[in-house]
Image (cartoon, rainbow, N blue to C red):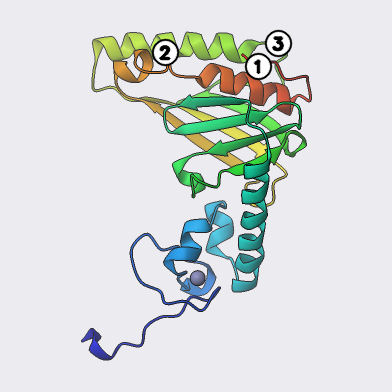
């Protein structure tokens, strides 16, 4: 019976461990609700994380929040569940997505930290940072119109883009963002044709190629 079960203590802050959606670190230790909510790192890193590693991470996340609140996000893009903001003059961007954790404290990257960009539709690569020019705009729009045709015929079909970024940010060395389109409304609905996906990708591509960023 659970009556005399000793309550678990958070290995990072010493707080009580209770509630749902708690994150587990190495040694099957569970973080408390407050610490869990602040984590933003790749699954593979979290799986083997020590309490010391997590303490340094949460300090980094507090610095991230300061950066996020200080920079000027002149441009903001939304594509389904993925959001991106750009401070073109300071050379920073943020990315927010359900897999990346706390949406009120999105991960801030300097332009220099983004080293590679690739865009896939299902498993087929439609664009990458080795290809010069504004090809993210063209290829994403043409892929989106292909998806729109499929969804018009078959409302149950399911299609997604996978945006893969290689970064020197310590907690997200490889970032894979999946952007799903599973109804015609996802493409034609609010935000226009697929939202800002193609503009977002073009900016990421220019950043990865160390080219001047044009804001679309
Ligand atoms: Zn804690």
Q: Report the residue that reaches farthest toward the bottom.
A: 4
- The residue at which mark 2 appears reads as 192
> What residue do we see at 60% from left, 71% from top?
50
Which one is nearer the viewer's eye here, 73 or 9?
A: 73
Q: Which mark is residue 22?
A: none
Q: Residues within 10 Å of mark 1 (few under 14, many from 20)?
A: few
Cα–Cα gap, marks 2 and 1: 17 Å
- Please tell me which of labels 2 and 3 falls first in the chain: 3
8 relative to 124 in the view: left or right: left
Residue 32, placed above or below residue 94: below
Cα–Cα gap, marks 2 and 3: 23 Å
Residue 160, placed above or below residue 71: above
Quarter of the image for residue 174 reads top right
Cα–Cα gap, marks 1 and 3: 14 Å
Q: Residues within 10 Å of mark 3 (few under 14, many from 20)?
A: few
User: Secondary structure beneath disc 3?
Assistant: loop
Quarter of the image for residue 165 reads top right
Camera-side mark, 1 or 3 = 1
Q: Report the residue that reaches farthest toward the left.
A: 1
Image x and y of residue 155, in percent: 23, 18
> What residue do we see at 48% from left, 26% from top?
78
Residue 84, placed above or below residue 100: above
Image x and y of residue 63, in percent: 67, 54
> What residue do we see at 41% from left, 80% from top?
8
Which one is nearer the viewer's eye here, 3 or 50?
A: 3
Quarter of the image for residue 75 reads top right
- The residue at which mark 1 appears reads as 215
Q: Residues within 10 Å of mark 2 (few under 14, many from 20)?
A: few
């Amino acid at each position: 019976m659970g009556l005399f079960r000793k309550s678990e203590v958070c290995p990072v802050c010493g707080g009580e461990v209770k509630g749902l959606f708690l994150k587990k670190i190495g040694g099957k230790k569970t973080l408390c609700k407050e610490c869990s909510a602040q984590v933003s790192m790749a699954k593979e890193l979290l799986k083997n994380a020590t309490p010391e590693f997590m303490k340094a991470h949460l300090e980094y996340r507090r610095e991230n929040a300061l950066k996020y609140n200080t920079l000027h996000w002149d441009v903001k893009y939304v594509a389904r569940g993925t959001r991106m903001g750009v401070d073109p003059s300071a050379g920073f961007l943020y990315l927010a997505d359900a897999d990346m954790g706390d949406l009120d404290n999105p991960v801030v990257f300097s332009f220099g930290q983004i080293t590679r960009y690739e865009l896939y539709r299902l498993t087929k690569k439609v664009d990458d940072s080795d290809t010069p020019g504004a090809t993210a705009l063209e290829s994403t729009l043409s892929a989106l119109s292909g998806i729109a045709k499929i969804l018009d015929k078959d409302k149950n079909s399911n299609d997604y883009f996978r945006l893969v970024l290689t970064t020197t940010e310590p907690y997200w060395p490889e970032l894979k963002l999946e952007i799903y389109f599973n109804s015609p409304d996802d493409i034609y609905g609010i935000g226009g044709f697929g939202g800002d996906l193609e503009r977002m990708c073009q900016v990421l591509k220019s950043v990865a190629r160390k080219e001047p960023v044009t804001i679309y």
